[in-house]
Structure formats: structure tokens, C-alpha cells
Image: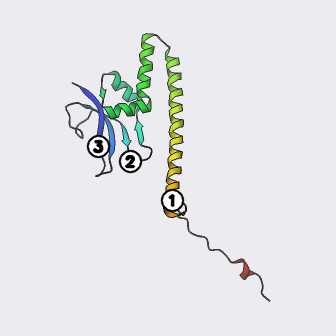
């Protein structure tokens, strides 16, 4: 039985949302699957990816073949890098502690870069709103009534 790690489409028309699943290669795209290992939302900016790295690595070790898009997702999230490091451990090129240290450094760098991308995207959205509306979107807080300073002073 050939096993694939692939995307299963959800969401309404023109608003896709995907589950990352492990499924038999003969099963239909949105049909029966073996295990759900994550989600992928390409609509958000940047795209939101939530994946269980340990489950994905386990299935890759068992011989599951990812599709092209899922391979790119796994590469982005560092799962394929960890598989590469574990292969080096198996061959004796490094110890498990060294591999884990390299992997954690890689994940921290990726998380830092992703946080900067989120900040950059928020700034782009704010700039777009300023361009369209002339100013930043007003906050939705209730306006405080301002007491005029001139009325409180006695008049002569």
C-alpha cells in the first residue's frame, strides 16, 4: 500500500483551507485518510501552517511520500531538515545531541524570520489602509465626550 502525505481541501468556494493528512494513495482527495497531522491556510498573509512535526517525521520514516506542496511545507517547517540530521546520526557523522542542537537553532531562526514577516505584513496592511482611507482606520472605541474648557470659566 502506497501512503502519501497530502492536502485535503476544506473551506468554501474561493476560500480554501487545507488539512495535511496521511492517506492511501488510491483514496480520493477529500476522502478517507489515515491520520490528520496539520493544517494549512493560504489565505492569511503570511500563510498559516500548523503541523505536528513529530508525526510528520514519523510518517516520513515509515516511507510516506509527500506531494510537492506538502514537501515545500515540510521543508519550510524544518521537518525535512530534521530527517536529514537523523540520517547523519544513523551514519555516525554526529551525535543525537549535536543534531538536536542544530535543529533547535534552525527552528529559532525560522520562527524569528516568520515573526518579522508578520510584522512586515501588518505594516503593509496599515500602509494600504492609509492609502485608501487617507488615514489609519479609526479605532472602534466609543468616543469620550469632550467638555469644553471655555464654558466652565465664569463670564463677565
Tag 2–tag 1 contact (CB < 8 Å): no
Residue annotated with mark 3:
9
Closer to the camera: disc 2 or disc 1?
A: 1
Name the secondary structure under disc 3: strand
Q: Please state the horizontal and vertical placement of residue 56, each as a whole percent of the image.
A: 37, 29
Image quarter where the C terminus lies is bottom right
Please name the residue shown 50% across and 44% down the image: 118
Q: Residue furthest right?
A: 156
Which residue: 42% across, 20% down? 84
Q: Position of residue 42 (x, y in %)?
A: 38, 44
**8 horizontally vs 136: left or right:** left
Spatial separation of the CA atoms under disc 2 and disc 3 = 13 Å
Badge 2, how many Cα within 10 Å: few under 14, some, many 20+? few
> Tag on residue 43?
2
Count residues near mark 3 (Cα–Cα under 10 Å), then give few for <14, some for 14-19, many for 20+.
some
Looking at the rendered structure, which numbered label has been put on residue 131?
1
**With respect to residue 132, does 101 lie above or below?**
above
Amino acid at each position: 500500500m502506497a501512503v502519501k502525505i497530502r492536502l485535503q481541501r476544506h473551506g468554501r468556494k474561493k476560500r480554501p483551507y487545507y488539512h495535511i493528512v496521511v492517506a492511501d494513495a488510491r483514496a480520493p482527495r477529500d476522502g478517507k485518510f489515515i491520520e490528520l497531522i496539520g493544517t494549512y491556510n493560504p489565505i492569511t498573509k503570511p500563510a498559516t501552517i500548523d503541523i505536528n512535526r513529530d508525526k510528520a517525521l514519523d510518517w516520513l520514516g515509515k516511507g510516506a511520500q509527500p506531494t510537492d506542496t506538502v514537501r515545500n511545507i515540510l521543508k519550510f517547517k524544518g521537518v525535512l531538515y530534521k530527517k536529514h540530521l537523523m540520517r547523519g546520526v544513523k551514519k555516525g557523522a554526529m551525535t543525537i545531541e549535536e543534531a538536536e542542537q542544530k535543529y533547535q537553532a534552525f527552528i529559532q531562526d525560522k520562527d524569528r524570520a516568520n515573526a518579522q514577516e508578520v510584522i512586515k505584513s501588518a505594516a503593509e496592511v496599515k500602509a494600504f489602509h492609509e492609502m485608501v482611507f487617507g488615514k489609519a482606520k479609526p479605532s472602534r472605541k466609543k468616543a469620550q465626550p469632550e467638555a469644553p474648557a471655555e464654558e466652565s470659566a465664569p463670564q463677565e
